[in-house]
Amino acid sequence: MTIRAYAVFEGGGAKGIGHVGAVKALEDLGIQLLGVGGASAGSIVAALVASGYAADDIVSKELNLFRYFQTTPVETLGWHDWHILRLLAGNLPIITLMTWFILIPFFLSWHLFVSALPLSFVLFLFFASVPAFFLLIRVVQALWLPFGAIRPLDSQPSHGPSRLLRKLGWFDSAKAVTLLDQALRKGLQAGSHQGQGFTPPIRMRDLINANKIPLKLVVTNIGRGRLTLIDANEPDVVIADAVAASMSIPLLFPPSAIRGISDRHGEARFVDGGLLGNLPTFAFNEDRRNAARTMSSTERFPILAFTLDAQVNQAQAVEHWGLTRFAAHVLKTGIFGSQIQNAELVPGVVHIALKTGLETLDFDCSHDRAFQVREACREQARRQLQQALFDVPAQRVAALTAVQASVASILANNGQMPAQGRRRVALLAPSGSLEMDVVESVGRDRDADRIMRYAISSPAAPAAFRQRQPHFFSYADATAASLHATAQEFACLPRGIESLVAIPIFRSKDDVYAQPPPDAAGVLVFDADFSLEWLYANTALIAEIAEGSVALAPWLNV
């Protein structure tokens, strides 16, 4: 069976090369993408995939897209600006130390400032060593006069400092915009059956006219302080501009305009979409629901969220943090914590975690290193996708089918099941604190409630979860109000189903008999078009099923 899904790629600077491995894993498994989106570095991969690129077209063992256009990421950014920035980043602790020793006496007293300079220099040598001192000389030479009157020892001046002061960004993104537009045009032309040309710059409407999969990018409107989604509703938008804006890390790249964006945004300037939505899973929430309406009511259409070296979920002790570490973690939580919270509010998200081993600014990594990262992330993504989309669902269905057959056999042997009786079985898991989702089912393939969300307060199946004990419910005279269901949810319930038996799923066999019972992990539900009251009354059989259902607990939230 072909899985149809949406893919969303997280931002992460140079770590974004890991997303190419994820794309290769999707190709390996034959997963059909219905749409792609991303923020920051993820927007680059999303745009390339939307225009028709395969993973091997972006990075392969012999070639990468930069080599095809006879350039490198560092040359695209500007070698001299990059060189000085790396020197600054590599010696930031030393420069910070020097700054403190110089500025603190300056603010206290001019005489103290003058007298502290020799001590500052000695401490610098002690902490930094002589080689680092000469590195700092190169940095000072590059930065002493921002407009380049003094140059580094062996190169042209860096325009980064002056650009940072004048345009609020160290690098110039113009080369990146030009290169990306050429790459998008190449992808569209390669995939065109008629071989027609595309007039630069490539706009959203070009993707639409070429029948490419939908592309969704997020940027931050820095003037309004809000996230902006760019998709087919902005057909005149220049894609390269939107991608450049989405990857414009504040202070590294200047705020940029986006050609073709609608007038409702005014004279807006945009920066990194990752600032407010580094993992925009929400972008395909409506598309997913619409696919269920128009393509298949029984498919789940998952949103595959590819994350890069995620660490924000790991618990860390705060007691011994210093000011710098605390400030850094606050910034990380502000950017990445919200995306996790937002993703939890979007149904159908499957998280795929990629570990690249790269740093955000490792744009100068070699081609061989980039390919190694691609292959490592390919294997990570393939393994997680295989488990989440193929293995676990198959195992759940097999387990539910076995349980259904076993219960049906017992019912038949006791004369409790009609010859033509209809029976179904389902797994329910909590979704937040107020609802429960159907995780998997057998016998509901053609029923609208195969993909269903129930109020956790419902007197039907969720009651077993709340009460932590088996529960019987008859649908006789049930109404939407009595079931705590909306009119739409009530309409999805198949007519003819008479009753159900719900059994809480615990995490161990000891929990099944514990008093008081612990919180349940989910619910195993049997329903049929005949009465299941006899099954509910058979306490020995219910206990046996409850023990067996423990094996289902690990699969509820996978």
Image (tube, grey):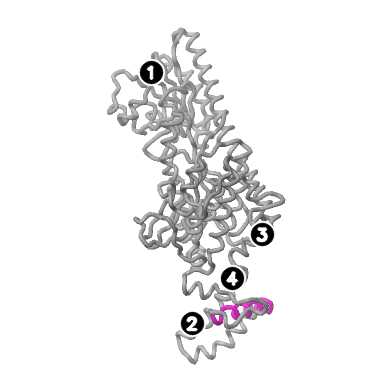
In the image, is residue 62 above or below residue 149? above
Q: Earlier in the sequence, mark 3 or mark 1?
A: 3
Badge 2: residue crowd in 10 Å (few <14, some 14–19, many ≥20): few
- Residue at 37% in and 24% down: 493
Identify the element where label 3 is drawn. Answer: loop
Magenta range is 129-145
User: Mark 1 = which residue?
Assistant: 497
Badge 3: residue crowd in 10 Å (few <14, some 14–19, many ≥20): few
Q: Is residue 26 magenta?
A: no
Pick the front one: 293 or 67: 67
Identify the element where label 4 is drawn. Answer: helix
Q: Earlier in the sequence, mark 2 or mark 4?
A: 4
User: Mark 4 = which residue?
Assistant: 81
Identify the element where label 2 is drawn. Answer: helix
Q: Amino acid at mark 1?
A: Ile
Number of the front mark, 2 or 3: 3
Q: Amino acid at mark 4?
A: Asp
Q: Earlier in the sequence, mark 2 or mark 3?
A: 3
Distance from Cα at disc 2 to Cα at disc 3: 49 Å
Number of the front mark, 3 or 1: 3
- Residue at 50% in and 34% down: 556
User: Mark 2 = which residue?
Assistant: 104
User: Mark 3 = which residue?
Assistant: 70
